[in-house]
Image: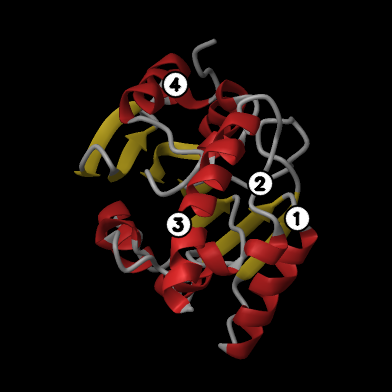
């Protein structure tokens, strides 16, 4: 019986993957709350995409203010909040209130009180955020309709020398190629600071240049 179940589920999963990927090219389709289990835990097959590894590669330190864009159920948000303690803060941003409530519940269970919750869409011009030292887009960029607008918003909210980490994995229907992310980054004004991974799973660190001239003038 189990053999037949696997025989059915594998091709069905492949069909769903490509249908979701095709549909997301024309419509904003974030991971629905009922599928949170797919993104709530680290995938054992993608070591370099694990929350702890991404945080280490991003060199996030205690005392920083970090924004987790498209935080989902908090796979990164909670460990980020632990990492920046005791004086740092994390802003969790997501368009789905159910996801934010899930993160809030996890934070309460760990007695974490340094997370701010913001509901809204990145790239839609509706977010009012305080400046930050580091921002993250982890398996999120492909879900954003106006990616250039999103990069511009993040550029403006980052402090000079601030870092944006973009992480992607091919298991995600919204996977974005490294060269496409770098093109967006250069157009905005970011400089490539670091890269970890390979063609299938990677994290890319992008730096906002320092200096008064670069602070509020991303490239158009």
Position of residue 78 relative to residue 164, above or below, is: below
Are circles 2 and 1 on residues that touch, CB within 8 Å? yes
Q: Is residue 146 left or right of residue 47?
A: right
Is residue 138 visible in this depiction of the protein?
no
Position of residue 181 relative to residue 103, above or below, is: above
Percent coordinates x, y for residue 183 in the rendering: 38, 18
Tell me the residue at 48%/47% (across/down).
14
- 10 Å neighbourhood of mark 3: few (<14), some, or many (≥20)? few
Query: Marks 3/2: CA distance?
Result: 22 Å
Residue beneath label 3, please?
A: 10
- Earlier sequence position, callout 1 versus callout 4: 1
Mark 4 secondary-structure assignment: helix
- Earlier sequence position, callout 4 versus callout 3: 3
Are circles 3 and 2 on residues that touch, CB within 8 Å? no
Residue beneath label 2, please?
A: 30
- Earlier sequence position, callout 1 versus callout 3: 3
- Earlier sequence position, callout 3 versus callout 2: 3
Residue beneath label 1, please?
A: 96
- 10 Å neighbourhood of mark 1: few (<14), some, or many (≥20)? many
Which numbered dot is residue 73?
none
Tell me the residue at 34%/63% (across/down).
50
In this rendering, the label closer to the viewer, 2 or 1: 2
Mark 3 secondary-structure assignment: helix
Tell me the residue at 54%/10% (across/down).
220
Query: Marks 1/3: CA distance?
Result: 29 Å
Tell me the residue at 74%/71% (across/down).
101
Query: Marks 4/2: CA distance?
Result: 21 Å
Residue beneath label 4, please?
A: 184
Mark 2 secondary-structure assignment: loop
In this rendering, the label closer to the viewer, 4 or 3: 3
Query: Marks 1/4: CA distance?
Result: 25 Å
- Earlier sequence position, callout 4 versus callout 2: 2
């Amino acid at each position: 019986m189990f053999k037949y179940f696997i025989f059915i589920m594998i091709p069905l999963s492949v069909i769903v993957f490509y249908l979701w990927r095709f549909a997301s090219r024309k419509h904003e389709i974030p991971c629905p709350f009922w599928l949170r289990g797919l993104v709530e835990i680290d995938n054992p097959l993608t070591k370099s995409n694990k929350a702890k590894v991404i945080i280490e590669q991003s060199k996030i330190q205690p005392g920083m203010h970090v924004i987790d864009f498209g935080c989902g159920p908090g796979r990164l948000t909670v460990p980020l909040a632990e990492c920046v303690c005791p004086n740092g803060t994390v802003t969790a941003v997501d368009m789905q209130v159910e996801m934010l409530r899930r993160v809030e519940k996890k934070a309460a269970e760990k007695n974490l009180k340094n997370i701010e919750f913001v509901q809204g869409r990145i790239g839609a011009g509706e977010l009012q955020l305080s400046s930050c030292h580091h921002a993250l887009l982890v398996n999120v960029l492909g879900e954003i309709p106006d990616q250039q607008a999103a990069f511009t918003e993040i550029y403006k909210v980052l402090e000079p020398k601030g870092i944006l980490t973009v992480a992607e994995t091919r298991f995600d229907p919204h996977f974005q190629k490294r060269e496409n992310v770098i093109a967006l980054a250069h157009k905005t004004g970011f400089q490539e600071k670091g890269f970890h991974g390979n063609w299938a799973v990677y994290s890319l660190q992008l730096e906002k240049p320092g200096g008064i001239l670069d602070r509020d003038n991303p490239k158009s």
